[in-house]
Image (tube, coloured by chain):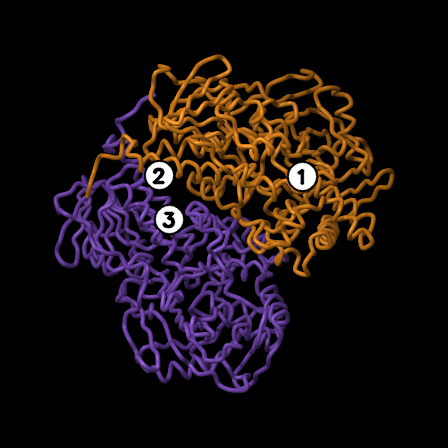
Chain colours: A purple, B orange
């Protein structure tokens, strides 16, 4: 099936909107009557909404799942082209991500992962292009460079962050942490600038921008430290957990498992292509009005809508001042991710940084396509933001500008991407916070609003911004809803067996 | 409430069998009729059985939970004495343990953990006593010593095990791994002996014996490599994940959450103090006979019985030859764990190894008790196995022999321990495999037997031997049973709502 989301370009097809994905759900709805009774309505079918809907349905609740898109997965989905998966958004998983890996094992997918990196052949080096200065180095030297730079960046306490964030699931566990949230990455770099070589500084800046999709001055230093801590306080840990292991079949093979399990209960009603316009809590129940004017109601509603999108939904009664302030500010990640098929098969083991002058700044060899081309995945962000679909020739130049140290400029045979900034259901990529934002608004984002519960990876306490945080949040609210409804003796399946 | 399990000793009370625990369940049963219909019987209320019973009950099945002990938790439970928890078995948890941490967050306990270590005060050093040679060093030097020794031990592939075990959830992913399973730790030490200093060798040997509870020649080298890999291939990772974070209130505060959630469904029947004698699969259903002659039956049975205990249960029809062979061999961990309250409060920041001549060989300062004493936890194993309850004066000497480099020998004010080797429901501590065992028998242990499913941390694929592996296994079989019964249209709660 083909989703409306995403773009492909090849020399023969030109730019095409919409790409094939296993995450597209057909038929798009299974609702037979608008009169149905639901225990809970879940808005959003990313990993958070899928988890909430699945858990609620499996545990006996009648669930209605509403989604604006034609597919599951939200900000994490894959497009399978000629049987080869391109990851349009969230990609990598690791066994250190508790909620994700619990599901990976549960769905017997622990052996269905493979490494993005393969440093075994062809051009086995890292190239670092800073303005018009360029050099190449081995991947061992790349690791040493990044590790040295990141150790300087993170060592605010003599223990590389272990004292400041001893418990990554409690970012603000220490008073110092709050102060560090006021710093931007730029502020921290100014503190240590004298100790950084030009190569270290460029590698460091491009790496933290890869994490944030923002600019150095718009990203919170503490939020980066939170990533660093949860990855084990080392660069090696960051690489292992952030950018190494991906699903052989693509993210959508994972997301569809949640949906299928929920559907098999016969307690899941769903409607895709159904954006929500208004959420009204009468006190007795919650009524949702879709953009096309349909209405549904339930005892509870779980909003799995991302922070940057919540402003487009009308809430009655209005949300709290704190939540409205958080929504008005939003998060700062405007990552651009572009996949390119490159004619040179020898680039499989290549990685590179071209910074700060290029619109894409960080790229790695990510696979070999069925055509035998090298698959390169490239990242940019707010630093020099661009919309890849606007001018494909320019986008191809931005991609080939990553390869300065190669004998011949590689030919671009295919582009695949999703413009998350222009996506009305995302308005940005994964959550990344501006300085001061989390200390002020984390609790606002997490708070419920009467019978409406808010769940999203954007305000998870652990792997916030990750698939794992989405599952954490979906799990949290599904349990809360079940326990509340059981307490109120409203769960119709409860009154069965007694021992 | 007081459990039959465990022992305490103080100068005034002498040796007392049975210790208080929050894990004791009262009333010990809620069964009102032996005629009740169950979908599934779960045998064993450790974390594996608790998870299986909870998931099944929450997801609509009628569950009977049978347990030989008077408490939940199996090989992981805590005794709260004067409000202070002593961990009798499995203790430490970490956010890198997927199944455990998913539950920790779900039960809102992520902030209920604290570090065992506190290196801030008093005697802040590591003492290493090898025979009659002894020395002290800083904890930084301790870490450097262990890291150097373990790096030599694990570096079989030039990448500290990353090539041999790239995927810790698939131990035998590479052909090399199978060969390494034939090696004992002793074999591997012989390979690298020339490169180890005496201090490195003693520290290394005591550390790997701490992990296995076995002897160097009876423990599989690959199984240790599996621990090393899943901890991130570093000594720092091992320390973080194996022995740092524990529950402030003790393990039993965690285990009881699973039980209470299951009970709240009204679909959980349970009986403690009810050892199982015979499990008979008629093909139509499974009948279990308890030691006191009661019989129960259900569509499926989940055995959460540990490997070393399975031989004491009669199965009809008999188990497969492979499973019987695995049971006959068993696992090799006979760890002895002894808690001691020590009169000297300055020992809070102390750690020590006394090896190989002492019955306890590895110990750390683990807390400060309400009386102001230092709480020390000490570990021994098969190396010089002993039963701490047999001769308390001897046990006190074994404890004080850990402190060779102190000005005054500390006074022992209290001992707390559980003799896992003499425990009929454990017959050993956490699973550790002999050379060759896993390559041959992992799949035998995991295989089902008609309508009987076998789940235990002893054969988990990830954190095998850990609480996490228990939850992994309970999750696996609960899902399998639910899907089977749903498929057979036997789930009595299924036929309710349709969207």
Q: Name the residue under label 2.
A: B483
**Element type at mark 1:** loop
- Quadrant where the C terminus of chain A sits is top left
Determine the chain carrying the residue at label 1: B
Residue drawn 31% across and 38% down?
Answer: B487
Q: In this view, does A392 lie above or below B466?
A: below
Q: Position of residue B454 (x, y in %)?
A: 49, 33
Residue A36 lies in what quarter of the image? top left
The circle on residue B434 is: 1
> Alpha carbon of mark 1 to alpha carbon of mark 2: how far?
35 Å
Q: Are marks 1 and 2 in contact (CB under 8 Å)?
A: no
Which percent across, then down, holds residue B255? 48, 32
Picture mark count: 3
Q: Is residue B353 left or right of residue B449?
A: right
- Residue holding disc 3: A473
Quick check: can you spot residue B87? no
Q: Are marks 1 and 2 on the same chain?
A: yes
The image position of residue A92, as x and y in percent, is 46, 60
> Which one is in front in this view, the residue at disc 3 or the one at disc 2?
2
Residue located at (57% from left, 22% from top): B312
Q: Which residue is drawn at 53% across and 22% down?
A: B314
**Mark 3 and mark 2 residues within 8 Å of each other at the beta carbon:** no
């Amino acid at each position: 099936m083909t989703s409306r989301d995403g773009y492909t370009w090849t020399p023969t097809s030109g730019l095409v909107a919409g790409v094939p994905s296993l995450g597209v759900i057909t038929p798009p709805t299974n609702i037979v009557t608008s009169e149905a009774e639901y225990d809970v309505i879940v808005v959003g079918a990313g990993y958070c909404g899928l988890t909430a809907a699945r858990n609620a349905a499996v545990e006996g609740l009648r669930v209605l799942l509403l989604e604006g898109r034609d597919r599951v997965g939200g900000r994490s989905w894959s497009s399978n082209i000629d049987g080869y998966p391109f990851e349009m958004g969230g990609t990598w998983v690791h066994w250190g991500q508790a909620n994700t890996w619990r599901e990976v094992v549960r769905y017997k997918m622990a052996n269905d992962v493979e490494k993005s990196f393969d440093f075994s052949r062809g051009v086995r080096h890292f190239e670092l292009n800073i303005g018009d200065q360029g050099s190449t180095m081995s991947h061992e030297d790349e690791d040493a460079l990044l590790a040295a730079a990141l150790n300087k960046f993170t060592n605010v306490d003599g223990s590389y962050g272990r004292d400041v964030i001893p418990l990554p699931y409690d970012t603000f566990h220490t008073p110092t942490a709050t102060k560090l949230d006021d710093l931007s990455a730029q502020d921290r770099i100014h503190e240590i600038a004298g100790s950084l070589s030009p190569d270290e500084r460029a590698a460091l800046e491009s790496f933290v921008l890869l994490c944030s999709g923002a600019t150095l001055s718009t990203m919170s230093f503490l939020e980066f430290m939170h990533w660093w801590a949860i990855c084990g306080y080392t660069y090696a840990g960051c690489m292992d957990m952030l950018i190494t292991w991906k699903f052989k079949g693509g993210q959508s093979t994972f997301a569809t498992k949640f949906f299928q399990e929920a559907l098999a209960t016969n307690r899941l009603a769903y409607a895709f292509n159904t954006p929500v316009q208004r959420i009204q809590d009468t006190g007795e129940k919650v009524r949702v009005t879709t953009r096309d004017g349909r209405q549904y109601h339930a005892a509870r509603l779980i909003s799995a809508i991302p922070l940057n999108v919540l402003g487009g939904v009308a809430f009655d009664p209005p949300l709290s001042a704190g939540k409205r302030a958080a929504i008005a500010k939003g998060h700062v990640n405007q990552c651009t991710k572009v996949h390119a098929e490159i004619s040179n098969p020898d680039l499989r083991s290549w990685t590179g940084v071209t910074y700060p002058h290029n619109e894409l700044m960080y790229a790695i060899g990510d696979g070999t396509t069925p055509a035998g081309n090298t698959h390169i995945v490239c990242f940019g962000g707010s630093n020099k933001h661009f919309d890849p679909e606007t001018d494909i020739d320019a986008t191809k130049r931005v991609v080939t500008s990553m390869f300065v140290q190669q004998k011949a400029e590689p030919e671009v045979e295919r582009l695949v991407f999703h413009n998350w900034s222009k996506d009305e259901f995302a308005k940005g990529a994964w959550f990344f916070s501006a300085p001061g934002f989390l200390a002020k608004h984390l609790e606002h984002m997490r708070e419920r609003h009467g019978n409406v519960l808010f769940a999203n990876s954007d305000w998870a306490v652990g792997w916030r911004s990750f698939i794992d945080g989405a599952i954490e949040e979906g799990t949290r609210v599904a349990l809360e809803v079940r326990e509340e409804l059981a307490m109120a003796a409203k769960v119709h399946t409860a009154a069965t067996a007694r021992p």
